Image (cartoon, rainbow, N blue to C red):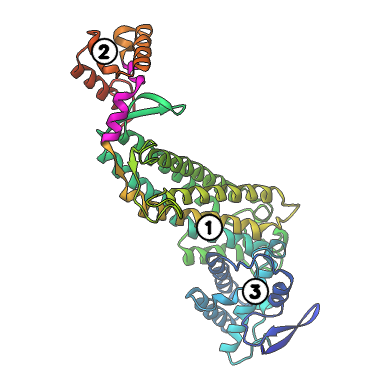
Amino acid sequence: MTAYRTEKDSLGTFKVPADAWYGIQTARALDNFPISGRMPDTDFIRAHVQIKLAAAHANCQPEWLAASPRDAIVAACERILAGEFHDQFVVDRFQAGAGTSHNMNSNEVIANLANVALGGEKGQYAPIHPNDHVNMGQSTNDTIPTAIRLALLAKLPRLLTATEHMASAFEVIAVRERDTVKSGRTHLQDAVPTTLGREFAAYAWTLRRAASALAATRPLLCETGLGGSAAGTGLNTSPGYPQRVATELSRLTGEAITVGHLVAQMQSMLDLQTLSSAIRGLALEVTRISNDLRLLASGPRTGLGEITLPAVQPGSSIMPGKVNPVMFEMLNQVCYQVLGQDAAVGYMTQAGQLELNVMMPALGSALFDAMDWLTNAMNAATDKNLKGLVVNRARCDQFIHDSVALATLLNPTIGYARAAEIAKESEQSGRPVREIVTAHGIMSAEAFNALVLQAAHGEGSGGGGG
């Protein structure tokens, strides 16, 4: 049987598990919000506790927070930041608007840890009180949006690293396959020659451009509204608190935390929407590239088959020997889910009213998921598939010399109309363009091959490298 203690708040009494480090308001939230079964994000837990630690230092001044309670609060926060007691942060991600329940979850856990360390008991909240001391000079209005931004700052380097990891893998292939000539395709139809190196170099460049857009959001996320307290008024804050707490957070996080507009940081989630848009841009490019790789790997006999992706598991429960491009199928699914999270962020960004956006718990959760899922999925696809990708050069060579689009290369020599006749003859007869060109005495097979290679590399056409 679970043992309970009884705590009291402004609504009355409520039972709290005796061994819990959280208190009555957290217990009420557990009872009120059995919604998703998903506990708070780890980076978010850490970020919110960092705020409590920074606030304790900032408030330690005459007539505010004495050194002894400051030290007890700091010690409790440091234990949590070291990885202890994360299982005590239990409020569902879908909870009371703005995140009051999570704020009180943090306040109660820290207060109980501090009081027990000072010889007190759980649930007695003396000498340190969750609201009066741990939450001094703070409000859900300013701590939750700041914690969301700090958690996103913690995740951002991981997503940027995963993006560069994939871009680098594409670049390695691009360099290796610089001279692998293949048929380009536009409208899913044969087009002029290119190289697989140029194709994959473009993937690397695109991912890095998307990463630049992501990185550009960092200064926005570094602006904090801490010190705004309730509704951005700065009510009940100690002297110089906004700058003092920003300085402490900079020290704790290693980020250049600055004081933003204290009212706007509670009303507006534009910086979070800007980040979400950048994540969306990356996801759109990643899913496009994933689709390309699945097409290029299609087959092995009846598809394009220009590349082979490493087999990581059997592909069918009924067809023996079948292997599917499962890592990039997974990556597609993750990208589509990330696009859904971006849509949710958009709706919640515009849902703010007057002095506060109360959608912040779910808004933050959507961004946390998007960043974590995309980071993990890109790393998995890169390590398990992209690094072991094999180019089927013979297949590329076969396709390029079968392509009717090679007639395009003859435009400068014989003109568009005559080149179109060559293309039509190739299509109707099934003979390669090179053979028809040689038969008509337009140029030798060797000269035509050289023309194909030149075109594939974009020489003389202003084409990019790769």
The stretch in magenta equals: 394-409
Give the structural element (helix, strand or loop) at label 1. helix
Which of the two discs, 2 and 1, labels the residue nearer the N terminus? 1
Read off the residue under disc 3.
Answer: 105
Q: Is residue 120 above or below residue 322?
A: below
Q: Which mark is drawn over residue 152?
A: 1
Q: Residues within 10 Å of mark 1 (few under 14, many from 20)?
A: many
- Total number of numbered discs in the rendering: 3
Q: CA distance from mark 2 to mark 1?
A: 60 Å
Q: Amino acid at mark 1?
A: Leu
Q: Residue at x 27, y 30 (%)?
A: 397
Name the residue nearer the viewer: 202 or 311.
311
Q: Residues within 10 Å of mark 2 (few under 14, many from 20)?
A: some
Q: Amino acid at mark 2?
A: Val
Which of the two discs, 3 and 1, labels the residue nearer the N terminus? 3
- Quarter of the image that includes the C terminus: top left
Read off the residue under disc 2.
Answer: 437
From the image, state whether disc 3 or disc 2 is nearer to you: 2
Q: Residues within 10 Å of mark 3 (few under 14, many from 20)?
A: many
Q: Residue at x 63, y 53 (%)?
A: 261
Name the residue nearer the viewer: 218 or 19.
19
